[in-house]
Amino acid sequence: MDLKDIKAIIDLMKKNSISEFELERQDFKIRLRRNANGVAQMGGAEEGGYIALPGPAVASPAVPVEPIVVSSPSTDLEIKSPMVGTFYRAPSPEAGNYVEIGSEVTPETVVCIIEAMKVMNEIKAEVKGVVTQVIADSAKPVEFGQPLFKIRPTA
């Protein structure tokens, strides 16, 4: 396996958010693992651990992979689906959406409809705030507990 193959594996790890990869062939074994710093580490299975491979003939033991972004915890609240059904952002196909990003809502504001067994169930915000994200897609199925919207609470 050459450096080009290892880079291809690292790209796959990035694209698919894989934190650990191991490949073993007849006389070859490689492990790649992203550590807490978002750096790929290469190693073998000698002594059961991950060992940095030294020397210029192999890839650097610190090949950058997708960095892990650490941010402060969001204060946004999620409006979750109370049931299984079909999510609709508007009361009818011709009507406008109940809420958009930036819309101010109160606990009584209807934010969407979930159709379950031919019954249209209005879902209310149940919190005072501003819509910051619409997570679910209109006219698509949703599961119980699935996030539908994010709301930033206001006083």
Image: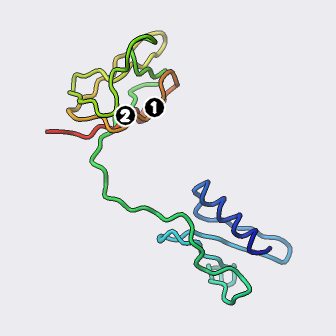
Is 83 positioned to the left or the right of 33 in the image?
left
Q: Position of residue 110 (x, y in %)?
A: 29, 20
Circle 2 crowding by C-alpha within 10 Å: few under 14, some 14–19, many from 20: many
> Based on the displayed image, in which of its 4 quarters is residue 109 positioned?
top left
Q: Amino acid at mark 1?
A: Ala
- Quadrant where the image shows the C terminus: top left
Query: Judging from the image, what secondary structure is the residue with disc 2 in?
Result: strand
Query: Judging from the image, what secondary structure is the residue with disc 1 in?
Result: loop
In the picture shown, does residue 71 fall above or below 42? above
**Residue at numbered disc 1:** 136
Q: How many marks?
A: 2
> Residue, x 82% and y 70% (percent of image)?
25
Q: Amino acid at mark 2?
A: Phe
> Residue, x 65% and y 65% (percent of image)?
10
In the picture shown, does residue 12 fall above or below 60? above
The answer to whether marks 2 and 1 mark residues whose Cβ atoms lie closer than 8 Å is yes
Is 121 positioned to the left or the right of 61 in the image?
left
> Residue, x 39% and y 62% (percent of image)?
70
> Residue, x 18% and y 39% (percent of image)?
154
